[in-house]
Image (cartoon, rainbow, N blue to C red):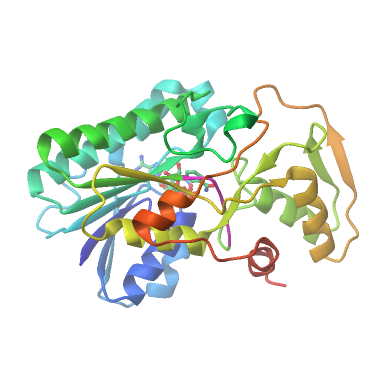
Amino acid sequence: MNVVVTGGAGFIGSHTVDALIARGDRVVVLDDFRTGKRANLAQHAGTDRLTIVECDVSHGIFAALAGLSIDRIVHLAAQVSVVSSVANPLVDMSVNYGGTLHVLEYAKAMGVKKVVFASSAAVYGDVPPALIPVHEDAPRAPLSPYGIDKYASELALDYYAAVHGVPTTWFRFFNVYGERQDPSSPYSGVISIFADRARRGAPLTIFGDGSQTRDFVYVGDVVRAVLAGLADGNSRVVANVGTGAEITVRGLAELIVSLCGGTSEIAHAAARSGEIAKSCAAVDRLRDAFGVVAQMPLADGLRRTLAI
Ligand SMILES: NC(=O)c1ccc[n+]([C@@H]2O[C@H](COP(=O)([O-])OP(=O)(O)OC[C@H]3O[C@@H](n4cnc5c(N)ncnc54)[C@H](O)[C@@H]3O)[C@@H](O)[C@H]2O)c1
């Protein structure tokens, strides 16, 4: 296959590129490097199966892909910060919704055989405990411009499939973790922040009492879902990508401290307003439609992430 990976220099994107190249595909990465890094793709230096094009997807992708023959697209490029989306909703709309429309316009014009899109558990908002684990058909009630633009993108993927015949599949990623997640980024996930502090013996700060839960899914399991989504079939299908198991943030902090040798203190700060209480994916559709079940136990995935 000839596959475009937008956001391919990022955390999930670079792991996706690794898997595509390992199975023999040709890959074109489109990335503007706002959070992604060329170093994430350095392992492929010298291969003729990877082409990297610097491109802002919110300005369109036709010129970047001129002259190339493209079968399928994995669309991961995004403004990934919920906090930034609240501060700059128009930028979020332009990159996250506008970028998706540009990808779909290209796919429609060029007869692309499948577009796979990275949506987010953020489309569900604060799910009532009775609906946990949350199923794909649960109400969408996003609480941020980031969640709104991910949901708008989902609607656009459905529309382009139904009306323009562009095959589309989209996944709602839960909390993804693994190697290459950037702990120095203010937008980084809680695992990379906790792990970075625990490795240095610095205190870990939990906002609130730590009883909030999350579903942490290892990046390798996410990539298996993306690859399954790229196959023919399953157009206009959405699936959660999580493990189906939830852990409290307090439990996560304790696990990371113990894996790192147990010297960091765990401190609490005032709860952040608007923080989601419980998050856990129903994963039966991922299994039944795509044949994918998350395999990596959290402690093992953390050891890999922490390289211990
Ligand atoms: N990491 C998670 O837990 C998680 C959860 C839910 C959804 N997602 C989604 O998965 C995707 C990948 O996220 P990630 O965690 O790898 O983040 P990341 O920041 O590592 O990757 C995003 C990539 O997109 C690139 N990018 C951003 N704006 C761009 C633009 N306008 N044009 C071209 N490239 C652009 C960045 O440079 C980066 O390489 C995103 O769509 C994100 O919203 C991630």
Q: Nearer the viewer, residue 31 or 20?
A: 20
Q: Is residue 37 visible?
A: no
Residue 176 covered by magenta stretch: yes
Residue 306 x, y percent position in the rendering: 69, 65
Residue 266 x, y percent position in the rendering: 87, 46
Tell me the quarter of the image containing the N terminus: bottom left
Q: Is residue 142 left or right of residue 44?
A: right
Bounds of the magenta span? 173-178
Q: Is residue 252 visible?
A: yes
**Residue name at image x 43 percent, y 57 percent:** 287
**Residue name at image x 61 percent, y 27 percent:** 128
Q: Quadrant of residue 89?
A: top left
**Residue name at image x 86 percent, y 66 percent:** 261
Q: Quadrant of residue 140?
A: top left
For residue 42, above or below residue 162: below
Q: Quadrant of residue 209?
A: top right
Q: Is residue 114 left or right of residue 138?
A: left
Total labels drawn: 0
Q: Nearer the viewer, residue 86 or 243?
A: 243
Q: Nearer the viewer, residue 280 or 255?
A: 280
Residue 121 x, y percent position in the rendering: 50, 38
Residue 29 covered by magenta stretch: no
